[in-house]
């Protein structure tokens, strides 16, 4: 793949994101209906140079702050949530690859390729044997004479057919404990994917989240030096929850925007004012503001942690994800009540079925109950009072 003429910087990112979002929105219904990857949007993202936004300048990237990337994610998600989700997951994995490359020549070379070739990075950190939990692994890294081997069964991987790089977690060695994990960056040509029966999900159909058995043969130099738990706590958790929050926020903005347009259209047509619908629009806006403020607060915490402890950061980013996934469902439901039957039926200018189905994916992608379960002991032990 040829590199884009220039990676977007400064104000250029807004125009590039707008063009990519327009392509994503134009094909969103077909992507959802056919349950296929948003190929047109992915091609546009690559052509606009938006895949490698976080890559440092010394490796050829624009080294944009995460805040800019979160805003691109939100804009994409307004037009096509599946495209926004793919972008969010890719950027969170990219953040891990960047933050933990260290002084490795191999990983530095991968970052240069991510910028120059606009590589798409996917995650393969789940496993059938662990029931989807990513803090432990059954598979292990096996060093043999011809390289490093890894076999993982039942891994749930999004957009695998389009991915160029896979970040795969496994036990450090055959005799390592299940929680003694390492992450390895695997190139497309180094991995064999055997798909299970394809899923037919309710929403986020374009993300193509399917289950695979995978076999890897690569070099030992492709393993990141730090434990996977370090990647999780320092990078993957905060970036993924901020980016996912932007996806849910984009869905909510799009749904409430359709409801507002419906009321404006109705008023222009001479229909009598509907005070209840207007009240619901205001209610939806208050919930949207809650999502925005929660995202903004966690973005500020990410950029300026100050005196926040690790536990406080853990609670903040996890509650952002849970709160946003609940609010997006409430907001899309309010939008449907405003639009009524026109929001319930396809096709049309005000239908909301795709937004509602995509919104319900929020609670099960990184399961909210699992997050709350992990937080329960922290909440039991910590204080409830908070200074502003």
Image: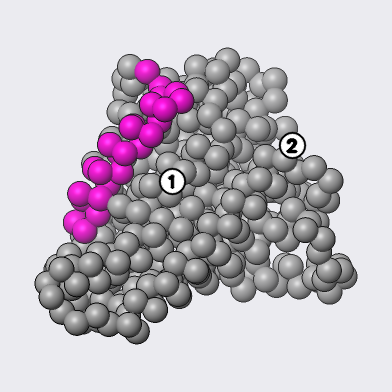
Where residue 61 sits: x, y (%)?
Answer: 50, 21
Query: Regarding mark 1 in the picture, which secondary structure is present there?
Result: helix
Q: Earlier in the sequence, mark 2 or mark 1?
A: 1
Q: Horizontal placement of 324 versus 80: left or right?
A: right
Instruction: Name the residue: 45% across, 23% down.
Output: 9
On-image quarter of the N terminus: top left
Which of these two is toward me, 245 or 213?
245
In the image, residue 28 lies in the stretch drawn in magenta: yes
Instruction: Name the residue: 71% across, 44% down.
Output: 234
Determine crowd level at label 2: few under 14, some 14-19, many 20+ residues with C-alpha closer than 10 A: some
In 3D space, how far apart are the residues under numbered discs 2 and 1 (Cα atoms)? 28 Å
- C-beta proximity under 8 Å, tags 2 and 1: no
- Give the labeled residue for mark 1: 73
Instruction: Name the residue: 39% across, 79% down.
Output: 279
Instruction: Name the residue: 43% across, 49% down.
Output: 74
Query: Regarding mark 2 in the picture, which secondary structure is present there?
Result: loop
Which of these two is toward me, 377 or 290?
290
Residue 150 shows in this picture? yes
In the image, residue 179 lies in the stretch drawn in magenta: no
Q: Which residues are magenta?
A: 6-31
Which of these two is toward me, 211 or 72?
72
Q: Quadrant of residue 353?
A: bottom left
**Mark count:** 2
Outermost residue toward the left in this view:
269
Where residue 54 sits: x, y (%)?
Answer: 53, 31
On-image quarter of the C terminus: bottom right
Q: Is residue 349 above or below residue 222?
A: below
- Give the labeled residue for mark 2: 226
Where residue 229 sits: x, y (%)?
Answer: 73, 48
């Amino acid at each position: 793949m040829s590199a884009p003429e220039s990676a977007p910087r400064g104000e250029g990112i807004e125009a590039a994101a707008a063009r990519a979002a327009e392509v994503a929105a134009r094909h969103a219904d077909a992507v959802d209906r056919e349950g296929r990857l948003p190929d047109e949007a992915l091609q546009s993202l690559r052509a606009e140079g938006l895949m490698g936004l976080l890559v440092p300048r010394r490796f050829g990237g624009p080294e944009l702050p995460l805040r800019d990337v979160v805003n691109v994610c939100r804009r994409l998600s307004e037009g096509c949530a599946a495209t926004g989700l793919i972008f969010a997951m890719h950027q969170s994995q990219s953040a891990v690859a960047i933050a933990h490359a260290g002084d490795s020549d191999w990983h530095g070379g991968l970052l240069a390729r991510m910028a120059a070739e606009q590589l798409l990075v996917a995650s393969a950190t789940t496993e059938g044997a662990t029931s989807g939990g990513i803090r432990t692994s059954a598979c292990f890294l096996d060093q043999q004479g011809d390289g490093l081997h890894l076999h993982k069964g039942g891994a749930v991987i999004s957009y695998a057919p389009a991915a160029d790089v896979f970040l795969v977690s496994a036990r450090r060695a055959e005799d390592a404990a299940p929680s003694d994990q390492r992450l390895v960056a695997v190139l497309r040509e180094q991995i064999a994917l055997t798909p299970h029966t394809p899923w037919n999900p309710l929403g986020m159909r374009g993300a193509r989240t399917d289950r695979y058995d995978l076999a890897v043969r690569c070099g030992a130099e492709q393993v990141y030096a730090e434990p996977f738990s370090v990647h999780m706590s320092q990078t993957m958790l905060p970036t993924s929850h901020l980016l996912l929050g932007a996806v849910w926020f984009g869905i909510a903005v799009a749904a409430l925007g359709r409801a507002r347009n419906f009321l404006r259209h109705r008023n222009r047509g001479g229909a009598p004012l509907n005070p209840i619908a207007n009240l619901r629009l205001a209610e939806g806006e208050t919930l949207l503001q809650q999502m925005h403020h929660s995202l903004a607060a966690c973005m500020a915490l990410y950029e300026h942690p100050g005196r926040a402890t690790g536990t406080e950061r853990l609670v903040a980013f996890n509650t952002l994800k849970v709160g946003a996934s609940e609010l997006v469902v409430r907001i899309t439901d309010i939008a449907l009540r405003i639009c009524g039957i026109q929001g319930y039926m396809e096709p049309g200018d005000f239908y909301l079925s795709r937004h509602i189905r995509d919104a319900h994916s929020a609670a099960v992608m990184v399961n909210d109950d699992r997050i709350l379960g992990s937080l329960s002991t922290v909440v039991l032990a910590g204080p409830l009072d908070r200074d502003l």
